[in-house]
Image (spheres, rainbow, N blue to C red):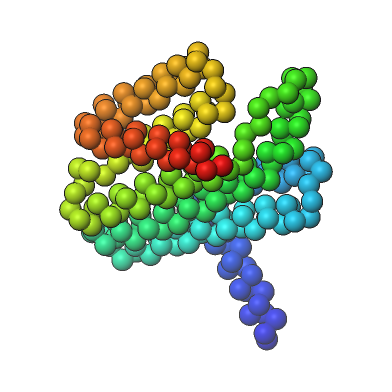
Amino acid sequence: MWVTKVLKSFRYALEGLKFTVVTQRNMRIHFLAALGVLLLSLYLPMSKTEVLLLFVTIILVLFAELINTAVEAVVDMVTEEYHPLAKVAKDVAAGAVLLTAGLAVIVGISVFYPYLNTLFQGLIGESADPADIGFAAIIAFDFFFTLMIKGWLHRMGKSDWEPSMTTSIAFCVATLIVAVIGSLILTLLVYFLTALIVGSRLRLQPNRLSIFLGMVLGTSVAFIGVQLL
């Protein structure tokens, strides 16, 4: 009897996975990304610890997407009309997916960079300035620090002072690139690209103060982070 219950539980679980893969575009993207990562791990001489770390990270991302889908289904079942609490539930669930995806990016960079950098330098046949893995930590810190400031200012009722997340990360990455390369022409090109990002943000979000604060915050975090490395 208990065997039948266990088999039914497995069947229901597989149906849930199948439903999520069939109906959720993001889950299909996660599955394809996971497949690519696993295939790449077979090609590279990775240690068991690194492979296990990749497996755990992949499972976390897929788990968060499953929870997000479940929350969306329950909210849609309870109400089909717009409700602020329904929006909060969906946004929080999506935030969980975003955090795990960010963790996956950091883990992927930390694990794959040494191998890919060796392959790249073998292809180009010359030495290049190695990017420090600490740069990924600086970008992650900038993301969480900006998010914390946005939440703090929102609770104080000063939404106009919330720094732009997109602009903050863009200028953080640009400053890190400049710190690694140290070339005037490439510096101008990098900041030209960030200027294009700022221009697009101005068209979508006319709050110039938010964009300016994002620029200052991202640049400051990157500059201080580079000094501490």
Drawn side of residue 195 relative to residue 19, left or right? left
Horizontal relation, residue 115 to residue 76: left or right: right
Looking at the rendering, which quadrant does residue 156 occupy? bottom left
List x then y, in percent, for residue 49. Answer: 75, 56
Q: Residue at x 41, y 58 (%)?
A: 93
> Measured from the top left, where is residue 220 in percent x and y?
39, 37
**Viewer-closest of 121 and 76:** 121
Check the image and name the residue furthest to the top.
185
The residue depicted at 76 percent of the width and 30 percent of the height is 119
Task: Compare residues 89 and 136 and report the one nearer the observer.
Answer: 136
Where does the image place residue 219, in percent across and percent down from the top left?
Answer: 40, 34
Q: Name the outermost residue toward the bottom.
A: 1
Figure disc tally: 0
Q: Which quadrant, please, contains the C terminus? A: top right
Residue 144: where, in percent of width, then height?
A: 42, 50
Q: Is residue 22 visible?
A: no
In depth, the one of 221 and 99 nearer the eye is: 221
Residue at 45 percent across and 40 percent down: it is: 224
Which image quadrant for residue 181? top right
The answer to whether 4 appears left or right of 88 in the picture is right
**Quadrant containing the N terminus in the rendered view:** bottom right
- Left or right: residue 136 compared with residue 54: left
- One can see residue 215 in this view: yes
Front position in the image: 194 or 74: 194
The furthest residue to the front? 227
Q: Is residue 84 above or below residue 131?
A: below
Q: Residue furthest right?
A: 45
